Image (spheres, grey):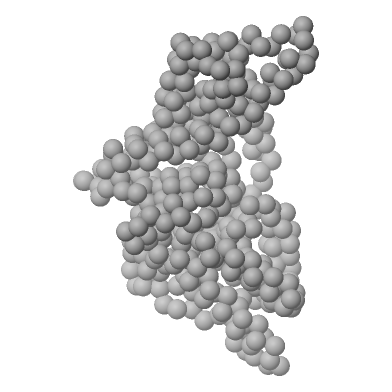
Amino acid sequence: MPDDKGRQPASISGLFMTTALIAGLSLVTAYLTGMIETLRFDSILTSVQSVLMMVVGIAIGYFVQIFVHEFGHLLSGIISGYSFISFRTGRMMFSKQDGKIKRTRLSIPGTLGQCLMAPPAPREGVYPYKLYNIGGGAANILVGLLLLAMMMLVPWPPFMRPIGFGLITVGLYMGISNLVPAGMQGIRNDGANVRALQSDGIVRQGFWAILQISANLVAGKRMREISSGLFAIPVAANKADPIICNWGALQVGFYEDWHDFGSANRLAREWFEAEGMPEMLKLELLSMMAFYELIGECNPNELRRLYSTQLQQHPIGFQQSLSRLRLDYAFELLFNHDAETAQRYLQQFEQVAVHYPYQGEVQSERELLALVDDLAARRQLPADPGSEASSDSVPSDAESSGTDEV
């Protein structure tokens, strides 16, 4: 596993800059809206109450501005000719399926919201991407400035002033922090995405392909039912770019859905070492590699390294992941031989699957669960030489990776 120690200074620096930005914006906003007048230290009780109200206002403002940010992406995408895929704040997700807007649930670790839009077909290799990317941050700043003007011009009731303060402060913070190009630990903001898309044609190709793949998945397709050309990553692609790395993780999933576990495992290990791979995607790749080991050689030392040592240290956020629940089920059944614990993971899988937005993925995961059940039964036989899963055939155009794919 790549050493992450060199990234710690960047994390500390980013935390310091974020704290300084929020504190500065809070002071300026408080001064301009008159909130700073409430911080009179001649009355400690009044000061504490005022600070608590401002904190509550920031918390409310953060929730509202997340919605504003994603709505900004939605509106700017529509203006740019994009078509709706999905809109999510928190776990609540609305997606277009069978021509209707459906409400589902989805939890993605590390994200509080997401708006996905399918871009129009490129014309001579060109498609709009700037407005769609900056629309979220621009909406935050616009709403923040409008509220700031309203609070400066029109007196607000005392109980509404902290909420307005929070909406303004958080809006300006989210807008600036998303539009000024920056990135940390494989996560890049909207401004940095625009800069990368502008400077690298392969990154633009990857961004377009990822959104098209997302549109197909929301429509209910499985990975194997999507055109293999969308997973063809040029050899010259920069693996230090997070968009390319996201593309690579989807490529692994494509081979996995074809049950070509040998190719999927090889690619997962290659992409895991990619310099720009986001930490959360590294955990997904680790899950994949651990699963392939379980259904393959099932080496105890390798499984302890992949699953017990690395994956179990990062359980937060994966309770709603079908692939992680499938891995936990397989680990208990094939390695620990604990059918009772495995059954609990299977029940949790079914609970998540009921409201899961990607029905094609649910179908794929059920096939892999059936494969695990079959392997568990076969490995209980005294002399069963066929302990590894058989592979289906990947389409020929996806196999010819010599010059077109990573």
Of all residues shown, which one is farthest toward the top? 42
Q: Position of residue 121 (x, y in %)?
A: 25, 50
Of all residues shown, which one is farthest toward the left? 124
Q: Position of residue 352 (x, y in %)?
A: 57, 63
Rendered image quadrant of residue 227: bottom left
Q: Which is nearer the eye, 281 or 264? A: 281
Give the residue drawn at x 43%, y 20%: 146
Q: Is residue 205 above or below residue 40?
A: below
Of all residues shown, which one is farthest toward the front? 157
Quarter of the rendering occupied by the C terminus: bottom left
Q: Is residue 212 visible?
A: yes
Q: Is residue 42 above or below residue 64?
A: above
Q: Which is nearer the eye, 16 or 23? A: 23
Give the residue drawn at x 64%, y 88%: 378
Q: Could you tell me how many numbered marks the image carries?
A: 0
Give the residue drawn at x 35%, y 57%: 100
Q: Which is nearer the eye, 115 or 9? A: 115
Q: Position of residue 60 (x, y in %)?
A: 58, 32
Q: Is residue 81 above or below residue 93?
A: above
* Position of residue 183 in the picture relative to residue 72 (left or right): right
Rendered image quadrant of residue 298: bottom right
Q: Is residue 16 visible?
A: no
Q: Is residue 342 above or below residue 214?
A: below
Q: Which is nearer the eye, 43 or 344? A: 43
Q: Position of residue 37 (x, y in %)?
A: 64, 8
Give the residue drawn at x 44%, y 51%: 94
